[in-house]
Image: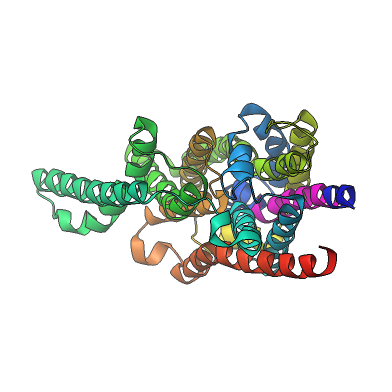
Amino acid sequence: MDMVIIGLGIFLALMFNFVNGLNDAANSIAAVIATRALSPIKAIALASVCCLIGPLLFTTAIAETIGESIVSSSFLSIHLIFSAMVGAVLWVYLASHFGIPVSSSHALVGGLVGAGFAVGGLGAIIFPDMQSVIVLIVSVIMGGFVTAGIIILVARMHNEDGTKYIPISFLAGIAFTVPILIITGAIKISGLFAVIIFIVVSPMLGMISAFLFGIIIMKICRRKNPQMLDKRFRTLQVFTCAFQAIGHGANDAQNAMGIITAMLLAAGMISSFNVPLWVILASCFAISLGTFLGGQKVIDKMANKITRIRPYQGVSAAASGSIVLSFMTALGVPVSTTHAISGAIMGAGLTRGYTSAVQWTNVREIVAAWFLTIPCAAVVAGLVYFVYSSILL
């Protein structure tokens, strides 16, 4: 019976990567389609190939986070993992059906949390220590105030009213304080703690980076021929789209790797958490296949219903989102590609104005889905485990 559950679990993990690609196809290609740099078919084909390459270029640190840092190993079993996978796949599929760009990574984390809670209560979940939480909160607030103060001072030096920049500069301070703390080793952020923190930080990093990148491009190119610039930036967009797809594949394909490896470890089929090569290749293929088939409703929302972007803004959004994804993948944080790229698209749109450039009604719908994903997937996975255990255990 256990071998059947393991086989079904591996199938579900690969199916999860498939629906991940189905939903998150929009992340890599929304900007390049919106500016008509590539047709939808060509963009999807390019993203599929790059998603396949991405996981082979990075470490498997995210797979280890998924498999070892969410639920305590003493509670981890093939039955818990199976229930978590069912909950996550159901939530991502429903979101894709209704065109909601949710985070597949967070759906998986929510599934693990819900199934873990059903098995062992709060004791099964790996929570951060309160000291780290307090240090982080104090640090990011200080970072926000310091950045806002610097921006106001610089604005006054140029005889400008710096108060209008307070909200964006405060957010920038918060967004960049967290990665600085991680890089310097001032605080250790991992597991569920890191996932929750980066629900907020990753879209902010994407938005601020794309906004600043877009402003720099505007300053440099303000006297250039618009038609010539559009042509050049459309060509450049193809490369940034590829880079973005590599980052997406590298980060999100590791979700299935972590689940399958954790299941093999729980079943005693491997002695330590080392991701087998066949697991890496199968996970890469599954996410690439999902990306190739594409989630057309999600692509339409990401490409056309957040903001209208021109080629230079598409480049700034794709480049900024890719840098955020690559950075987080290197740190081993299963950050949401949906969050990072959505934030980058918003930031690119903001270069044309706050109130008119971005369709905030659609943005609010997307952001609401971000915060609902973990609890919704957790509830579904918890119910699945309850039904599953009642029938089979």
The residues colored magenta run: 8-24
Left or right placement of residue 151 versus residue 215 in this view: left
Residue 167 visible, this orientation: yes
Q: Which sits in the foreground, 240 or 35?
A: 240
Residue occupying the point 63% across, 33% down: 60
Instruction: Find residue 138 and report its horizontal and vertical position in percent.
Output: 26, 50
Residue 241 visible, this orientation: no
Q: Which sits in the foreground, 248 or 257?
A: 257
Which quadrant holds residue 23? bottom right
Left or right placement of residue 52 versus residue 58 in this view: right
In the rendered image, the vertical position of residue 114 relative to residue 276, given as above or below: below
Instruction: Find residue 9 and report its horizontal and vertical position in percent.
Output: 80, 51
- Main secondary structure of the magenta stretch: helix
Instruction: Find residue 304 and report its horizontal and vertical position in percent.
Output: 57, 61
Residue occupying the point 16% across, 57% down: 163
Instruction: Find residue 185 and report its horizontal and vertical position in percent.
Output: 36, 32
Left or right placement of residue 195 versus residue 138 in this view: right
Q: In which quarter of the image is the C terminus?
A: bottom right
Q: Which sits in the foreground, 167 or 192?
A: 192
Asked whether 71 falls inside the magenta stretch, the response is no
Left or right placement of residue 372 versus residue 153 in this view: right
Q: How has the structure been colored for display?
A: rainbow
Q: Which sits in the foreground, 259 or 289?
A: 259
